[in-house]
Structures are given as C-alpha cells and as structure tokens.
Amino acid sequence: MGLEVVLKSGVEYEIVAFLCELWLRDIQGNVLFEGELDSYGSDDVLRFTAPADGTHFLGVDCVPGELLAGSVYRVGSKSQTDSSFTSDLGAYPADMIVGLLNSGGTIGIGVNLELGVEYMIVGVCDQDCGDLDLSLSDLDDNVLFTDELDDAAPVLQFTSTASGLHNLWITMYACSGEPCSFAYNVYRR
C-alpha cells in the first residue's frame, strides 16, 4: 500500500520527489492527496494539511532504473513533534529523509552534529524489508556508533563527541521486494 507515515491532524506537510510520483492514502486505502509536477517538470510536490491524526500511507512510484539519487524524497512539516526529542533541521534540512535501496545496498549521508548534544537517529523501512542497519562515522570513516541488530527499526542514541559533518551509513541487509523504502530522522535534546 506504501510507506507507513504517522501524521498529526492540522499540520501542514510537504513531500518532494525527484523523478517519482507521490500520493497519500488513508488507512482504508482511499487516495487523499496527489502530487503535482513543479515548474521544472522533474519534481513531484505533494502539499497538504493532515485531515486526521494517525497512520497514513505514502505512495511513491519512481522511474525504473534510476539511481538512488534520482529517487530520494523528503518529508517536512511546519511544526515539531510533541516528544522530548525534537527534529533536528540543522542535521539535515527535512523532518524525515526517505529513499530506496536494494538488498545489500548502502548509502552514506552527511549529517551535521554539535559537540556535547544528545542525539537519537531512528531508521524504519517498508513491509518488504527484514533488516535495516545504521552506523555513524567521522569523515575519516572511523565508526563511532552502530545498530546492527537483525531488525527493521535501527536506533542510534548517543552524545556527540565532535561538532561538524559526520557520515550516516544506511544499509539494507534484507529486502524481499526490491527496492525497499527506508526512512530516518535525526532528533536531539
């Protein structure tokens, strides 16, 4: 049905995809919103105000054969969550980063961290994904923190030992229906 996302009623969301079509369905499978092409004709933009709290499904249909860089999309909102951790837009300029990987695929994404700040990085993947792992390294590829458990919801929780750019490595170890969707978010407190 799509990538499961939890939305908050009344919050304005924007989802942008490069070389992909986007739509949002409710829990019953009804299409609530569909994306529209931007003025350049390459990005599909889905803007909406969530009609209700709870689980919804984000549909993404990307051009076959495109590289991951051509199919990464971003989800952002105009308000923050109510948890004690808040989304860290300084680490990456979106509330949730989502992409596609085949089984065995890895992607490295740069995140900016601040010395002494406690972070939590959470990863999730779709129903066809059996194992997703996260690891964080410095720019010299020294692994600082890792979650390599055999599960589809890795979590890194740590206090940063240095300020600046770090590499977040996302690895899709098991995907039964390639490609599998993944998402992650960086929180701080």
Image (spheres, rainbow, N blue to C red):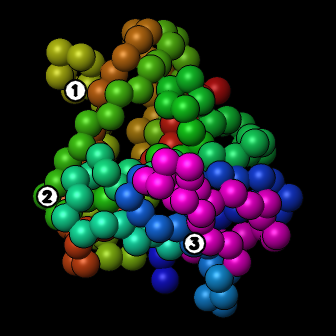
The residue under label 1 is 143
Extent of the magenta region: 32-58
The residue under label 3 is 23
Q: Nearer the viewer, mark 3 or mark 1?
A: 3
Q: Is 75 located above or below residue 151 in the figure?
A: above
The residue under label 2 is 104
- Which is nearer the N-term, disc 3 or disc 1? 3
In the image, what residue occupies the spot 32% across and 59% down?
Answer: 100
Q: Image quarter for residue 51? A: bottom right
Residue 5 bears which disc, if any?
A: none
Near mark 1 (Cα within 10 A), the count class, few <14, some 14-19 or many ≥20, is: some
- Which is nearer the N-term, disc 3 or disc 2? 3
Q: Nearer the viewer, mark 2 or mark 1?
A: 2
Q: Amino acid at mark 2?
A: Gly
Q: Amino acid at mark 1?
A: Val
In the image, what residue occupies the spot 50% across and 26% down?
Answer: 91
Near mark 3 (Cα within 10 A), the count class, few <14, some 14-19 or many ≥20, is: many
In the image, what residue occupies the spot 55% across and 17% down?
Answer: 117
Q: Image quarter for residue 178? A: bottom left
